[in-house]
Amino acid sequence: MFERRVTVASKVGLHARPAALVAKAAAAQSVKITIRKDDTEPVEAGSILGLMTLGAGHGDEVVLSAEGEGAEAALDHLAQLVASDLDNN
């Protein structure tokens, strides 16, 4: 299992448009990616609803996890996205 810790950069957190962009990118990966905050159960990163119920706000640290072939590259891609300001994309 591979993990990446990343800080949410979008000012609205992983809500609305940023959540949709992250979910779309996660769903396009060849491995299943989960996301969690330290005090929560993981949810599927490819689920907009899952991301929104996570309640990850601006400045919160989240943990992305995946396993299997291509997991590290997929996590790197998604971590870069979460660490970007997606409010205006």
Image (cartoon, rainbow, N blue to C red):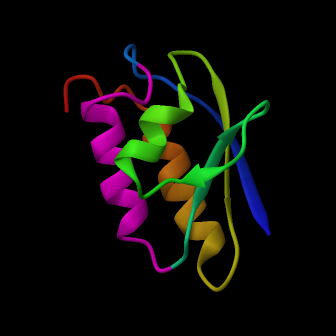
In this view, the residue farthest toward the bottom is 69
Q: Is residue 83 visible?
A: no
The quarter of the picture where the N terminus appears is: bottom right
Residue 22 is covered by the magenta coloring: yes
Q: Is residue 38 left or right of residue 22?
A: right
Question: Where is residue 81 shown, x and y percent of the image?
Answer: 43, 43
Span colored in magenta:
13-30
Task: Return the residue nearer the eye: 67 or 74.
Answer: 67
Please give the name of the residue rendered at 30% of the width and 57% of the height, measured from the top-left corner: 24
The quarter of the picture where the C terminus appears is: top left
Task: Return the residue nearer the eye: 72 or 41.
Answer: 41
Q: Main secondary structure of the magenta part?
A: helix
Question: Where is residue 78 shown, x and y percent of the image?
Answer: 49, 52
Image quadrant of residue 37? top right
Question: Where is residue 76 shown, x and y percent of the image?
Answer: 57, 57
Task: Return the residue nearer the eye: 75 or 37.
Answer: 37
Question: Where is residue 30 shown, x and y percent of the image?
Answer: 47, 80
Q: Is residue 63 visible?
A: yes
Please give the name of the residue rendered at 61% of the width and 57% of the height, measured from the top-left corner: 34
Does residue 9 sit above or below 40 in this rendering? above
Please give the name of the residue rendered at 47% of the width and 45% of the height, measured from the top-left corner: 50
